[in-house]
Image (spheres, rainbow, N blue to C red):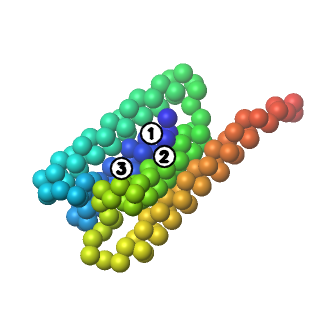
Amino acid sequence: MGVLFGCGIVAFVDEAVFHQLLHWHHFYDRSTQAAGLVSDGVFHAFSWFATVASLFLFADLRRRGALSTRRWLAGILLGVGGFQLFDGLVQHKLLGLHEIRYDVDLLPYDLAWNGAALVILVAGAFLLRSVRRAGRRPARDD
């Protein structure tokens, strides 16, 4: 559930900061400016849908008393890092939908983008591992 929230939030931040505020790229830059704006709108709708849907799931977990905030946070980190790494490797490089920025040396941008994604992804994996280990420990009788 946290993964969906992480994907939605990072997609929203990417779209708001890099697409709207900085004007570095659109979600789809292989066509006209109008197509780029429409693709940004679809991307923005996805980010909000994912975020809102995940918050309903969060509320349901909390209502049922099944919420683990550490697991939820691990999921968020995994979602953020996974989405950002997918964006950097698949959308930027493999499919060529867009670059982080145009008319500059991309290597520092790619290293920062994908490096940050890996750090966040690894942090989420370690946190999830610690949550799972804590769940397997036998209860102590004090």
Outermost residue toward the bottom in this view? 105
From the top left corner, tell me how far across and down residue 134 is, in percent: 73, 40
Residue shown at 33% from the left, 59% from the top: 96
- Name the residue carrying label 3: 11
Left or right: 106 as drawn, with respect to 80:
left
Residue 75 lies, with reference to residue 119, above or below; the image says above
Q: Which residue is mark 2?
A: 79
Pointer 1 local density, CA inside 10 Å: few below 14, some 14–19, many at least 20? many
Residue 79 image point, x, y percent: 48, 46
Front residue (pair 17, 35):
35
Task: Say few, some or many: other residues with alpha carbon within 10 Å of mark 3 (under 14 / 14 to 19 / 20 or more).
Answer: many
Residue 37: image tag = none
Q: Amino acid at mark 2?
A: Gly
Give the residue pinned by disc 1: 4
What kind of residue is marked 1? Answer: Leu
Label 2 vs label 1: CA separation? 6 Å
Dots 2, 1 in contact, CB < 8 A: yes
Query: Residues under labels 1 and 3: Cα distance?
Result: 11 Å
Going by the numbered disc 3, the residue's amino acid type is Ala
- The residue carrying pointer 2 sits among few (fewer than 14), some (14 to 19) or many (20 or more) residues within 10 Å by Cα, namely many
In this rendering, position of residue 65 left or right of residue 141:
left
For the residue labelled by badge 3, is the local secondary structure a helix, a strand or a loop? helix
Mark before the other along the chain sequence, 3 or 2: 3
Q: Residue at x 30, y 56 (%)?
A: 97
Q: Earlier in the sequence, mark 1 or mark 3?
A: 1
Using the image as rendered, state which of residue 24 and residue 54 is in the foreground: 24
Give the spatial CA distance, label 3 vs label 2: 10 Å
Are circles 1 and 3 on residues that touch, CB within 8 Å?
Answer: no
Residue 76 on image: x %, y %: 50, 45
Furthest-front residue in view? 94
Comes first in the chain, label 2 or label 1: 1
State the SS at label 1: helix
